[in-house]
Image (cartoon, grey):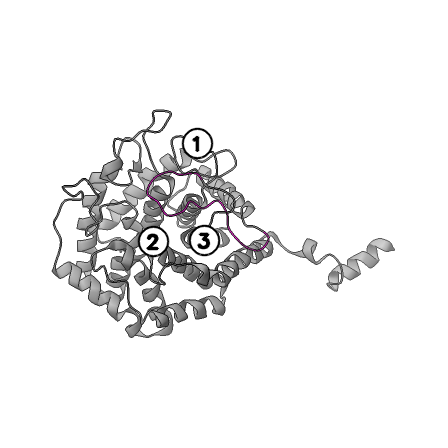
Amino acid sequence: MKRIFLLLLLAAGLCGPLAAKSPAARDRELIDRAARWQIRNFTDSLLPKGHWANGALYRGMAEWAAESGDESVWTFLRGIGEACDWDMLERVYDADDLCIGQTYMLLAGRYGDPAMAAKVRERVRYVMSHPDTNPLITPKGKYYRDRWGWCDALFMAPPVYAQLAQCDGRADYLDFCFSEFKVTTDALFSFEDGLFHRDLRLVNDREKNGEKVFWGRGNGWVYAGLALLLQYVPESHPSYAYYLDLFRRMSPAILRCQDAKGSWHAGMYDPQSWPQPENSASGFFVYGFAWGVNNGILTDPAYRKAAVKGWKALKSHVQKDGKLGYVQPIGHDPAHVTAEMTAPYGVGAFLLAAAEMMRMK
């Protein structure tokens, strides 16, 4: 009799509301909590709205809004565009300042308003018509910012070129992007390791254990950027096979660096020196694995298992109020992180992973 009464209470929603929720529903609540925390705390940042750190956040938020149907996130993003007058920061050639253009392009498509992407299109066409041919490192030994001289740039700028190509039906965006992408890859990609050096200054650096320095988030930028590119570049364009091959070359190298709990670290080849999880790298890698699995590119069951394990680890670092911890601050090489460290790009990576994991069957 008691069992029947309990079942009736459950059916009426009067008992055990948490127990009645599916794993997917619990995940959605946690993801929404992380997104809302970042929106609430967005004004705490001293960074300009158009800064790349925020641009990466916006892209993750747009993916989550598209998956969840949360109109409040779209409203937040549209408000950012309006506050920026749909413009970017002033460095015309710098890949970082183009990152926000990814979200402008998505918003222009969603709201049917070409004006939202007009300044992005203008800037890209200017760069293409006035190309820079300088080497990727300056005479003073610094990496060159007016070309894609650091691996992070491969997330920031190339997807914008591909989005414009799809929107305008013009292959010249793809041709220019392909040419520049190859220059960066030839300089920074280790075919032996399947990973990217962050920039030419660091190619010969070594970890305490003697291994090469491969920065977790740096490789996360590239891997997630490739997943984005492959969604826009048509298979008929020569660059598609190139990006796909690079994505497949990086995948096993990234898989080997995942730890037993599902996370990746700031230094991919020396987790003993960098023992904390690093959730901007982890978010981008989970996103890439999940996207590859969902699109039939990563068919080995090991990648699905790694995505699920990585997602579980990411969720464990979302605090009760929604703050995502263990995100390395802005930098260019491995550094120590704590549970209280967070940053907008880390939440962006988390939301990219979240949207793709929710699509996984």
Label located before the other in sequence (1 or 2): 2
Residue 140 horizontal/vertical position (percent): 16, 41
Let me know if residue 328 is in the magenta part. yes
Binning the other alpha carbons within 10 Å of mark 2 as few (below 14), some (14 to 19) or many (20 upward) gives some
Q: Is residue 157 visible?
A: no
Residue positioned 59% across, 57% down in the render: 25
Residue 230 horizontal/vertical position (percent): 31, 52
Residue 71 horizontal/vertical position (percent): 48, 69
Let me know if residue 224 is in the magenta part. no
Looking at the rendering, the stretch of residues picked out in magenta corresponds to 320-336
Give the Cα distance between marks 1 and 2.
Answer: 28 Å
User: Which residue lies under the disc numbered 2?
Assistant: 228
Q: Label 3's element?
A: helix
Q: Is residue 74 above or below residue 333?
A: below
User: Which residue lies under the disc numbered 3?
Assistant: 347
Q: Amino acid at mark 3?
A: Val
User: Which residue lies under the disc numbered 1?
Assistant: 271
Farthest residue, direction right: 1
Image quadrant containing the N terminus: bottom right
Q: Amino acid at mark 2?
A: Leu
Q: Label 1's element?
A: loop
Magenta: predominant secondary structure element? loop
Give the Cα distance between marks 2 and 3.
Answer: 17 Å
Q: Label 2's element?
A: helix
Residue positioned 36% across, 72% down in the render: 82
On the picture, is 85 further left or further right than 122? right
Binning the other alpha carbons within 10 Å of mark 3 as few (below 14), some (14 to 19) or many (20 upward) gives many
Quadrant of residue 98 within the rendered picture: bottom left
Label located before the other in sequence (2 or 3): 2
Label located before the other in sequence (3 or 1): 1
